[in-house]
Image (cartoon, grey):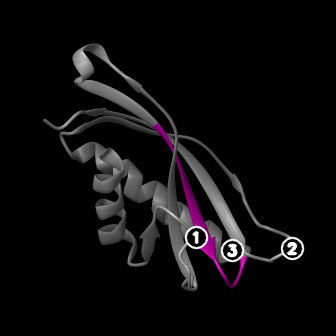
Amino acid sequence: MIEKIIREKLLEALGCGVYFTEPAKPPREYVLIGRIGSSEGAARVINSVLLAVRSINADSIGGAMELNERVKRAMAELEADDRFTRVRCNSDSDLTDPETRRFGMQALFEITYYEEE
């Protein structure tokens, strides 16, 4: 599963928690990864996935924006890994929840990669 590789790379690059589901006791700053869609290429060798990467900061929208920028830089560095052929940030937007005042940003990434055997 390509998300596991991406999670490990983000853990190394960001220095904060990176999760697939909301943690029971969320830290002050963390990232959530979620698959929005995917497709299989020819012979299931080259595939693509659309990921939502949410940057959450308990203190401020500025903190969430800063973490979002760090996420985008770390994701761009995935192209240095031979398993990835393309990593593109499609868009990013404010994801702050006004009720809980949980500050967040969400970036959508289109990723093309070679399937591991």
The amino acid on which the numbered mark 3 sits, given as a three-letter code, is: Gly
Q: Which residue of the protein is positioned furthest toward the front in this rendering?
A: 24
Q: Earlier in the sequence, mark 3 or mark 2?
A: 3
What amino acid type should be assigned to the residue bearing mark 1?
A: Glu
- Crowdedness of circle 3 by 10 Å Cα count: few (<14), some, many (20+)? few
Q: How far is disc 3 from disc 1 in space, using C-alphas?
A: 6 Å
Badges 3 and 1: C-beta atoms under 8 Å apart? yes
Reply above or below: 42 against 59.
above
User: Toward which corner of the image does residue 14 lie, by quadrant?
Assistant: bottom left
What residue is drawn where x is 72% and y is 72%?
Answer: 103
| Left or right: where 112 falls relative to 65 | left
Which residue is situated farthest in the left direction here? Answer: 117
| Quarter of the C terminus within the rendering | top left
Residue position for label 2: 99
Q: As rendered, which of 84 and 8 lies closer to the eye? A: 8
Residue ID at (73%, 60%): 95
Q: Earlier in the sequence, mark 1 or mark 2?
A: 1
Q: Residue at x 56, y 80 (%)?
A: 24
Element type where label 3 sits in the image: helix
- Disc 1 + disc 2, Cβ < 8 Å: no
> Callout 2: helix, strand or loop?
loop
Which numbered marker is on residue 62?
3
Number of labelled discs?
3
In the rendering, at what x and y percent does residue 30 appear?
52, 74
Residue 94 vs residue 117, the one in the foreground:
117
Residue found at the far right of this picture: 99
Indicate which label's residue lies in the foreground, 1 or 2: 2
Q: Main secondary structure of the magenta part?
A: strand
| Disc ID at residue 66 | 1
User: Does 59 appear in magenta?
Assistant: yes
In this rendering, position of residue 84 left or right of residue 62:
left
Residue range highlighted in magenta: 50-60
